[in-house]
Amino acid sequence: MKEYDDFLKGVKAFLKGYNFSKKGGNFIRESENFYEVINFRQDKYSTKEEALFAVNIGVISKKILEHRKFKFFNNLMHNQWQTSLSDLVGRNDFWITVNETVDMDVLLEQIKAEFTLFVLPALQKYSDEYYIVEKLWASIDSGKILPFNTAEDLLILVVKSFPQRIEDAVSLLRSKIKDSNDRLFIAEIMRELNING
């Protein structure tokens, strides 16, 4: 849809001023330790007359990607923090609609304002290794998630950035992970990272 394509050009020009570059449906900015990603995802039911899209944002640790021997992927699959624009701004509707009745200039100004007030500060806040470690730690400690990737992410960041916390991280994982297969998985990660215990 031409209106949507023109809208994305306006978003690109705006985000370029904040050092984001466009790759596919993503706008990506590199910081020292993270990739900051703003993802525009068009709904599969979009038509030539109407486009529905959502905006997701997240951060991806370079150290975790490097350990896993991944080059950067053009999606948020390997993120350490992610949310949608609608959740961030408190909007009930996940999808944003573009059609001939929508004033595209108004929509672009709305998105710019939301990025300025919510998205850019959130990316700055979450592009912090200490914050990410605390978030991963809390997720595991709560016991509300299956901590496969979370446990691996925690161990990688602790070893690479907070080695004084290795013993505490291992104790946390041992206290929360009871399944023998899960324990084998964690033991393998510990071997890869040269963690004794």
Image (cartoon, helix red, strand yellow):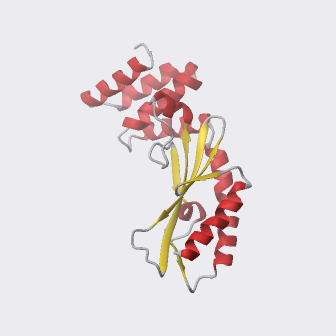
The residue at 48%/31% (across/down) is 154
Residue 63: x %, y % from top left: 54, 31
Q: Residue furthest front?
A: 2
Q: State the residue in front, 128 or 8.
A: 8
Task: For the C terminus, give its image quadrant.
Answer: top left
Residue 148: x %, y % from top left: 37, 36
Q: From the viewer's perspective, is 134 left or right of 108? A: left
Q: State the residue in front, 87 or 169.
A: 87
Q: State the residue in front, 103 or 131.
A: 103
Q: From the viewer's perspective, is 184 left or right of 47? A: left
Quadrant of the rendered image containing residue 14: bottom right
Location of residue 161 with respect to 143 vertically, above or below: above
The residue at 44%/15% (across/down) is 194
Q: From the viewer's perspective, is 177 left or right of 161? A: left
The residue at 68%/77% (across/down) is 105
Location of residue 120 with respect to 157 vertically, above or below: below
Quadrant of the rendered image containing residue 163: top right
Q: State the residue in front, 12 or 68.
A: 12
Say whether residue 93 is visible.
no
Residue 145: x %, y % from top left: 38, 43
Q: Residue furthest left?
A: 180
Say whether residue 165 is visible.
yes
Q: Residue furthest bottom?
A: 101
